[in-house]
Structures are given as structure tokens and as C-alpha cells.
Image (cartoon, helix red, strand yellow):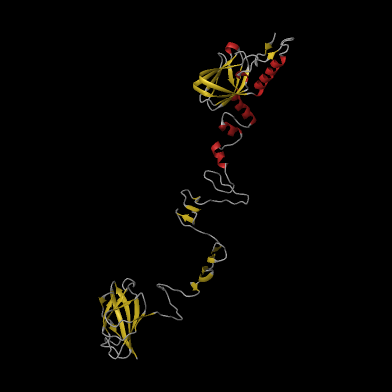
Amino acid sequence: MATYTTNGGIKKIATGDESGTWGTSTNTNFDILDRITNGVGSITLSGTTHTLTTTDGTLSDGMFKVLVLGGSPSGTNTITVAPNDAQKLYFVKNGSGQSAVFSQGTGSNVTVPNGESRIIYCDGGGAGAAVTDMSSDFGALAASNNLSDLASATTALTNLGLTATAAEINYNDITTLGVVQASKTVTADASGDVRFDDNDVLSFGTGGDMTMFHSGSDSFIRDVGTGDLKVQATSFWLQNAAGNKNAIRAVDGGEVILYHNSSSKIATTSTGIDVTGTAVTDGVTVDGTLDIEEVYEYVNTFTSTTGTFTFDTTAQGVSYLTANQTANRTINFTNVNANLAVGQSVTGSILSTQGTTAYYFNAYQVDGSTVTPKWSGGSAPTGGNASSIDVYTFTIIKTADATFTVLASQTQFA
């Protein structure tokens, strides 16, 4: 008479049994062996209880090596392993949506939470059978070999001699070497280059005092912190992008040169500056001796012949009235008080063209206020000079705010 193995339910055919059907039983045994050694079974759970049965001589769910839990249990599901005298080793993966509790007898049980996996051992101890979680012992094994820890990532990292957390190690999970990425380690590519994409900021200082970045349109070096932005070099060059044209050069202990289209225009010297070319300025203040070899002075021409003539002291030094004057006139010097300091002066000349009937300037103003000039020779002119050019020269000296001494002369050129 046939019997069955205790744990696997494999049929042991007795001598002389199953004449003509022996092959069928043997094939079933082979299928059972395959299921016991490598079988993966999908176990559908429902409700809150399920029986995982191993039936002698029949392919059954309790024979699977790997149990994949699924279904739609209504709560924590207790899975009873039957029979209670069969020893089992199961690899369990729980995807049922609920916790699964494995039980075989009145002994200990093992809970496999939803979404987790366990290796469990059923001792087959009959009514008092117990289920043990063998996975819990793997941590000690890993620690002794200094490899990993399936139960605790923190312990695994410690076993490997690492002080970083798993999150910190993931900073190295970059996409492309040499390209800066958010919350990742900065790396260099095979050429040793590091690329910051548009609007990726390189920041210096605790409060981001200085930053460098490219916006996609422009490049920026921005200093907003305490102190100065200093560029220190023994020989400093500022050039174009191609590196073939100069803009500024500064030499330690020597000159500083400003260039226009790589041509030197202003260079500092030990005594001042050296200008190459023409200097066009809106004004010049000289504190010291002025040594001039030659001066070209701008003459502003006018065709007016009557009324008040406005002489803008910031626009010219000489005004030339080219048309014959037709009446005596007032001259008003403007932009004087605002531009002169007390103790400074300005000089202007007016060339007044006269026809056969001569006229002259007989009233005088500074910034619209009447002044009385002191005339060369002691007397003010009483008329002009016919068929000539009368040249009036006025030197205005500021003695106090809006207070002036005016020195004047009239000279006939015919």
C-alpha cells in the first residue's frame, strides 16, 4: 500500500502497486518535486482567513516554494499552514493590500506586512507548531561579514564603514558627468571640465555674497556682499572673447592702459597720463600748473542783430555776430553762478560786426541780473565803431554766491 512523504506529500509507491498506472503517479510526483523546489504560486486572499494546504499525492498550493500573495482581503488575513505536522520553508511576497499572518499551530506566528517580503520556516510541530521569520537573522549574518543588512539600511551602511546616509549617497546618482544637476554631486567629465547650464549659479560666501552665472542671454559676475570685489594679478589683461583685442591692461608697479579697438589711447605714467589722439571733454578742472603748447578754441557764430544776446558760458568761449548790428543790445551771460566756485572766473569774447551805422552793447547781465562792469581805460563805451568788428571781452569773477566782479574791454578791428 502506498504512503506519502510527511513534508511534501510525495507518493511512495509500494512494491507491486499501481500496475499500469505507475507512470501517472510518478509524473505527479515529479510535478510536486518541481513545485516544492522552484514553484511560484499566486495565492488569492479574501476575507480575513485562508488555509494553505499540502494534500498528499495531489498538486496543491501548500507545495509552492514561493508564495505571491494577492487578492482583496477585507483586513489582516490569517493564513493557516496545513497540515500542522509538515515542515515548510516559504519565500513570501505580500502584495495583497493587507498584512498576512502565517500560523501553523499554537506556537509563534509571523506577520508579513503589505508590500514586504519574508522567508518563513514552519516547524511542523503538530498542535503547538510555530512559524519563524528567518529573514530577521540575516542582519546578524550580514554584520558579521561586513556586507549589508536587509532589515536596516542604516545598519547596512554602518557595516560597510560608511558615515553617509542613503540619501547622501544618492547625491552621486548623476545623469551626465561634468554637468551640474540640482541636489547632486558636482563632477568633471573625461576632459576635466564642469558645465553649469543656463541660470545655474556658482555662489561664494555664506550669504551668497558673490555669484557667477549665465542667464541664457548674458553672463554675470555679481558681488552684493560686504567689502570690495578685487581682481588681483601681476599683469592683468581685459580682452575680447577671441583673445586677440585688448581693452584694458594693468601692470603691477607700472602703467594702466585703456584701448580702443586694441589701439592704446590712455596710459598712466609716473607723473600723470599720456593721451594718444584727441581728448573731447565737457569740462576740465586743473589743480596745478597748466602747460599748453597749443589751443584751438571753438567759436560759435550767430546772425542775430537786435535784442538781448545770450552768451552761454558752457557752450563756447567766443561768440561771433556775423551780421551788421541794427540796434544797441543787452548781453546776458548764463550758467555762471551754478558752475563757478567762489574765487573762480570765466572769460568770454563777443565779436560784433558793425555796418555804416554803429551800435554797441549798452546793458550787461549775469544769469539775468544786471551788473556794472569795470572797463579797461576807466570808461564804459558810448558807441560802436562803424564798418568794423568790435571785440568785447568780459572776465567774470565770482566773489560770493550770485555776486560778481566783471572786467570788460572794447577793441575795434577794422
Residue 26, placed above or below residue 391: above
Instruction: Spot the residue most to the front.
Output: 20
Q: Nearer the viewer, residue 104 or 46?
A: 46
The residue lying at 64 percent from left, 23 percent from top is 39
Q: Residue at x 60, y 11 (%)?
A: 126
From the viewer's side, name the closer residue of 288 and 75. Answer: 75
Depth check: 162 or 62 in front?
62
Q: Point out the image quarter for the N terminus.
A: top right
Q: Position of residue 224 (x, y in %)?
A: 44, 54
Spot occupied by residue 377 in the image (x, y as percentages of width and height): 29, 88
Q: Where does the image place residue 37, in percent across and percent down from the top left?
A: 66, 22
Q: Residue furthest top?
A: 1
Instruction: Give the residue at x 35% y 79%.
Output: 347
Residue 32 makes an appearance in the image = yes
Q: How many marks?
A: 0
Quadrant housing residue 51: top right
The answer to which quarter of the image holds residue 174 is top right
Task: Residue 225 in the image: state x and y as whole percent.
Answer: 45, 53
Q: Is residue 165 visible?
A: no
